[in-house]
Amino acid sequence: DGGITQSPKYLFRKEGQNVTLSCEQNLNHDAMYWYRQDPGQGLRLIYYSQIVNDFQKGDIAEGYSVSREKKESFPLTVTSAQKNPTAFYLCASSIGATRTGELFFGEGSRLTVL
Amino acid sequence: DQQVKQNSPSLSVQEGRISILNCDYTNSMFDYFLWYKKYPAEGPTFLISISSIKDKNEDGRFTVFLNKSAKHLSLHIVPSQPGDSAVYFCAASARSQGAQKLVFGQGTRLTINP
């Protein structure tokens, strides 16, 4: 089955620690995204990548880093510089440059900072 | 600056009746609009979309209406079913190069009562 796999589903972190969230897709999509969801807020774009070895900051990139070494993979690192990292993180992909095509989302990773 | 707003955080509707979810936007450059449905602890899934050159798009029980002059769109679900209970996000995109960068509203939690 084609889709997007995020892991882990739940993650706990102590303050000051970096954590990496995994996102893998087998849809052969060129573009991949990371969004953050907080209660009462819409999804906010952290980073996106249109092609391998290239990525751009979204609206709330501070305290996060990404890499895109393979088409299938777009891991997100939440660094200790992120002031309020507790949130639900969603990875998504799309076919490519089309602005009319929908995003396909993974099931999300919930990060809690203790 | 919230470019896409869903002013109703929640909506409760009787099963079999019509559900109407509303969305307002401020950016006149948006030319494509989408609705996503999200169950708890899952990623959003695409529901229906509409181009700004249209004022209505219908898919089964779901119809999206667009009023460009009012910068307003709405999603109608009729008849509403218990499985429609979820959070609904409105999203918009503007003509731009590259990836599908969507701006999301805050979401509306729809509850269908039996």
Image (cartoon, helix red, strand yellow):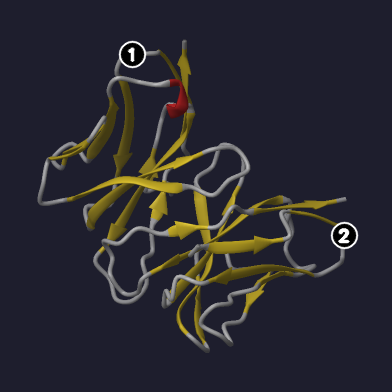
User: Does A16 sit above or below residue A36?
Assistant: below
Looking at the image, which residue is at 32% across and 36% down?
B23
**Residue B59 location, x and y as percent?**
22, 39
Circle on res. B16: 1
Residue with the most extreme front position: A1
The chain identifier of the residue carrying mark 2 reads A
Q: Is residue B75 left or right of residue A51?
A: left
User: Left or right of B1: which side holds B24?
Assistant: left
- The amino acid type of the residue labelled 2 equals Glu
**Disc 2 with disc 1 on a shared chain:** no
Q: Where is mark 2, residue-wise?
A: A15
Label 1: chain?
A: B
Question: Dot 2 lies on which element?
Answer: loop
Q: Secondary structure at mark 1?
A: loop
Snapshot quadrant of residue A106: bottom right
What amino acid is found at the position of numbered circle 1 in the picture?
Gly
- Give me the residue at 43% from left, 28% from top: B84
Are dots 2 and 1 in contact, CB under 8 Å?
no
* Label of residue B80 in the image: none
Q: Residue at x 52, y 89 (%)?
A: A53
